[in-house]
Image: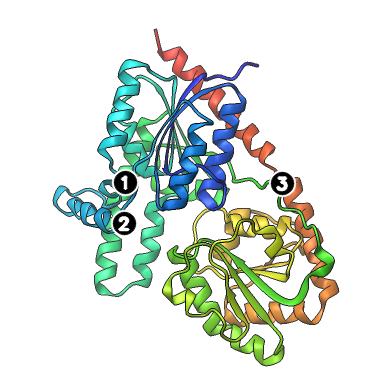
Amino acid sequence: MPFPFRDVVFLSQRIPYPPDRGDRISTYHILEHFRRAGCRVRIGCFLEDERDERAVVELRGMVEQVVAPRIRPRLRRLASLRGLLSGEALTLPYFRSAEIGRAVDHWLRDDPPDLIFCYSSSMGQYGLAHPGVARVMHFAELDSDKWRQYAEQAGRLGRWIYGREATRLLEFERRVARAFDASLVVSDIERDLFVRSIEDVVPQVVPNGVDVEHFTSRNGVAREPHTLIFTGVMDYGPNIDGVAWFADACWPRIRAVFADARLLVVGNRPAPRIAALDGKDGITVTGWVEQTPPWFDRAGVAIAPLRLARGLQNKVLEAMSMGLPVVATPQAAQGLGAVDQDALTVAPDADAITAAVLRYFREPALARATGARAARFVRKHFRWEHMIARLDATLETVAARHNARTP
């Protein structure tokens, strides 16, 4: 069957290249699928740093056109305050760009695509004004619920700001979901939350996948059985909170039993709170690394001690694909759905996390067996080709419905 769309405007918060962090992994693989299908692709996205500016040069060689203004966080935070005057979610002016807006309007007016594909709800603001073309919103997860979680953890001022953002952003997410032809989320749990929050729209579940060939152990026999690893972008609030909490609540107890224990915190842009851990009590904070698989192969156990989490965690999938036993909080594990028995350890608090890590340290054979089951589970359920097949089914339905409405 021919691919249902030939000309795509692809809008994402971050540049969808290279695939080196959660949302970029997803957007990259979806973009690659459009390219392999022969689609003409035009991209609107934001750049965050100098590496992104170098990456956009490569991306422009891959697609028809890229419009990619640089995000300046301080200026954007000031711009987002306009939401207090307009009554809208602060997220929307933060990701509002006249340059992207003009490009989308130009594309739709002078050379219309047959699909607008948006990743992350904030990018939906660029597609709302163009109902004449098929539109798909990949929410991944409801960002409004992330702000609700922040509000529950914050002080009085934070509760007001984050609570307001949760309410206003959910209003916008409802508007987008009702206007677009299809909504996508990454897990059954996200779908259930979605239908409770946006009662008249049922999203399709298209989980994140794993490049299982890339995330395959090359040297598992050389792993250090008393070494832990955490991977993730380290200026992201939930990652900062999770690692800092683990270092305070769990790590001293682990080191008291295993004095040679090491913790590898692998990820770009470590916040000061995380950077300060480097070199203390066996902790290494790497900053940016070219690839994570060699670091996974140095560790005996992976951890995902997230207390604030939404969606499906790539860090968990990648560690499992590498054949590592993973100790994860319920928040970090929830997006996986039903996991095969003994393929993942879910630990709800500091005591349970500490006990699970110590058990794997004491029993390296158990750690290896659990990691092998984890790798088999991921290869069975989370290969990218399985996820792309789900996406294609949704796109075919969208095209059929849109064509039926178009004279």
Q: Is residue 270 left or right of residue 218?
A: left
Q: Position of residue 7 (x, y in %)?
A: 48, 20
**Residue at position x 29%, y 33% in the image:** 101
Q: Secondary structure at mark 2?
A: helix
Residue nearer the viewer, 157 or 81:
81
Return the mark for residue 73: 2
Q: Label 1 sits on what residue type?
A: Phe
Check contact, mark 1 vs mark 2: CB within 8 A. Answer: no
Q: Is residue 296 above or below residue 191?
A: below
Q: Residue furthest left?
A: 85
Q: Position of residue 320 (x, y in %)?
A: 71, 59
Q: Is residue 127 left or right of residue 250?
A: left
- Figure colour scheme: rainbow
Q: Label 2 sits on what residue type?
A: Pro
Q: Quadrant of residue 385?
A: top right
The tag earlier along the polypeptide, 1 or 2, is 2
Residue 218 appears in the picture as rendered: yes
Q: Quadrant of residue 323?
A: bottom right
Q: Which residue is mark 1?
A: 95
Residue 194 appears in the picture as rendered: no
The tag earlier along the polypeptide, 2 or 3, is 2
Disc 2 versus disc 3: distance between alpha carbons?
A: 37 Å
The tag earlier along the polypeptide, 3 or 1, is 1
How packed mark 1 is, by other alpha carbons closer than 10 Å (few <14, some 14-19, many 20 or more), is many
Q: Which residue is mark 3?
A: 381
Q: Position of residue 68 (x, y in %)?
A: 38, 39
